Amino acid sequence: MRIALLTFTLLILLAAPAQAAPRQVMTFEAPDELLDPGRRDATLDEIRGFGVTQIRQLVYWQQFAPGPDRKRKPSFNASDPNAYPALGQLDGLMAAAQARGIKVILTPTGPVPRWATKSKKGHLNRPNARQFGQFVTALARRYGAQVETWSIWNEPNQPQFLMPQYRKKRPVSPGLYRGLYREAHRAIRSVPENRRDEILIGETSPRGNENVVHPLAFLRGMTCLNAKYKKTRSCARLDADGFAHHAYTTRIGPRFEPSDKDDVTIGVLDRLVTALDKAGRARGLPRGLKIYLTEFGIQSEPDRISGVSYERQPAYYAIAEHMAYVNARVALFSQYLMRDDAPREEGYRFRGFESGLRRNNGQRKPAYRAFPNPLAVERYGPSDVLWGLIRPQAGVTRITIEVRRAGRRNWTVLRRLNTTSRGVWGLRARHRKGQQFRVRWTSSAGKGYTGPATQAYKLGS
């Protein structure tokens, strides 16, 4: 059944009309480099060279607020963008991105200034929603002409961004987030330049436990729905233009399926589609919301616990991107990190993210060369199903797919074909044990590209 389904999907992709508009946008996140004036321009040039024209940037309220460690709020007009001198570093990024034709998704988020918490302790506990709305108003006034998409609060179902998550084993964070989101939404819409902007809700992380609220439980909680998606009390529908989610998987691969039905990794994205449809019918959210996968990556070595080999990283990423691409509800996919996080000084050194295209020392991984032209290859019975994308090239591109049989040194041409106008292509080949594939193409400027070799992976049943 799955072979037939994938073959049908490939035929649809290959038959797409030349004038079809891209259905899925790519965004890139490189937080350390993009707020560093010394590395910003080079990183933006790299991102633009990949064919990516959108980036995501978190805006930590604590980082930009006056007196963030004080118990008492300083005297200032919190809705006035000029009251936040630290926004100067964000100004530099916005100007540099605009000069390159790169759009910016802004995500206002916690941690928060101490004076904005209910207990005046720490930077996460019960943030004041009204004051958050004032901060978002300042951002909207400052960047209203430059930003078209906003996403509210990074991973609010995680305790490192919002507290408390639970109280007496019952989720609390969804209700807190509901208030924060409503104030932020109202703030953005209050600025004339932003009245037609996209505003994304959710930004949920993929899996939960006793400390982290499961993403679908979080969705139900913030929309006042019970486990059967029925209203638990009278509460108004939350207006939104899309649902943002971080569908990270494990080292098992993109088709991993978590056992808890309220978890959503890339391998079970239809769980989120179903939940959004139920929430739409219950009038908790607008009907038919698109899904924005605003943060995603594949962990690699040197993390031996969560990471895969350098060779598997781009292969798994391409398979995940293919899975997102053929899901009609997905409007956006993403790459999280240009460069791996720095190793920790104590304990297990690789507790951060090793999902970058470069190692922390700047050395390029195979993923760097693969990112402009992802190649997904999966085995289904006697066939290897190939899917790819020529990201930097606008329009139809002539490409060569090459194959190298097991035990041989030379590559031979498997097929020459044209991509769709979106740069997408698909192919089915006979499976042979140990064979590898790669893609070659030449840009309109005459520059030749050769992607890294990848084999077929059998990740699903």
Image: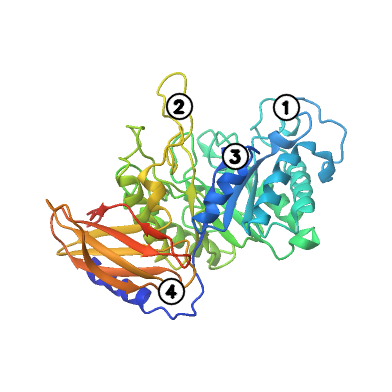
Quadrant where the N terminus lies?
Answer: bottom left
**From what the image shows, is residue 386 above or below residue 90?**
below
Pointer 3 or 1: first along the chain: 3
Q: Nearer the viewer, mark 3 or mark 1?
A: 3
Left or right: where does residue 298 sit relative to residue 170?
A: left
The amino acid pointed to by label 4 is Val
Q: Residue at x 67, y 56 (%)?
A: 98
The kind of secondary structure element at disc 2 is: loop
How far, Cα to Cα, is label 1 from label 2? 32 Å
311 or 124: nearer the eye? 311
The amino acid pointed to by label 2 is Pro
Q: Nearer the viewer, mark 2 or mark 4?
A: 4
Pointer 4 or 1: first along the chain: 1
Visible residue check, residue 175: no
Report which residue position mark 1 lands on: 120
The kind of secondary structure element at disc 3 is: loop
How far, Cα to Cα, is label 4 from label 1? 57 Å
Pointer 3 or 2: first along the chain: 3
Pointer 3 or 4: first along the chain: 3
Query: Disc number at residue 396?
Result: 4
Report which residue position mark 2 lands on: 343
